[in-house]
Amino acid sequence: MIDWYVVFTHPAAEARTVGHLCRQGFESYLPRYRTIRRHARRQETVWRPLFPRYLFVAFDVEATPWRVILSTVGVVNLLRGGEKPLRVPAGVVEALRTREVESKIVGHPDRFRFQPGQPVQIKDGPFSELIGRLESLGDDDRVQILLELLGREVRVEVAVSRVQAA
């Protein structure tokens, strides 16, 4: 019976490893989430691995020569319990795929509630109850907000969980 297993990869090699596994005939899946990357005054939407350095591969542990995976370029190891790989519980990969298709990625659900330029209110902390304009979303669950303080705009960075729509 074909089940899903977890592959541990080299740093930043998840996508290349998926390609190598596919060329060997293994079905593999790399769950990703959408984020905004800023570089050199540009911003672009990119897809990042939901679980950095991990991906899923499907095979029948009894009928497939699965040890070939261990020598695949980009693979460090399979998650194993003893000699055999550990099976991912049924339905986990399918649920991740469904959420990815619906753009409801499970990694950072609060991040996608807000859009740059939207008025937001800080819920707690030293700036609690102040209303500002959302400037940008960071990669690490933080947002930058422009607040009107002392007659000028001041940029404040807070956790996305401390912000609500104004």
Image: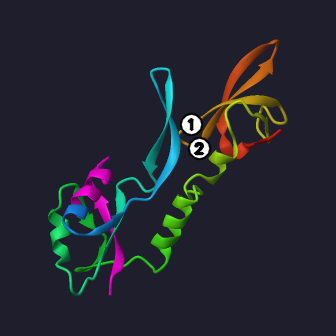
The residue nearer to you, when weighing 26 against 157, is 26
The residue nearer to you, when weighing 129 against 63, is 63
Magenta-drawn segment: 1-20
Q: Vertical placement of 27 versus 116: above or below?
A: below
Q: Which mark, residue 141?
A: 2
Percent of width and height locating residue 18: 29, 58
Q: Is residue 153 left or right of residue 17?
A: right
- Quarter holding residue 128: top right
Q: Which residue is mark 1?
A: 138
Q: Vertical placement of 115 versus 30: above or below?
A: above
Q: Is residue 125 left or right of residue 18?
A: right
Residue located at (56% from left, 36% from top): 138
Percent of width and height locating residue 44: 49, 33
| Secondary structure category for the residue under label 1 | loop
Q: Vertical placement of 145 versus 23: above or below?
A: above
**Kind of residue at badge 1:** Gly
Percent of width and height locating residue 90: 46, 81
Percent of width and height locating residue 166: 83, 38
Q: Vertical placement of 87 versus 121: above or below?
A: below
> Distance of mark 2 from mark 1, alpha carbons?
6 Å
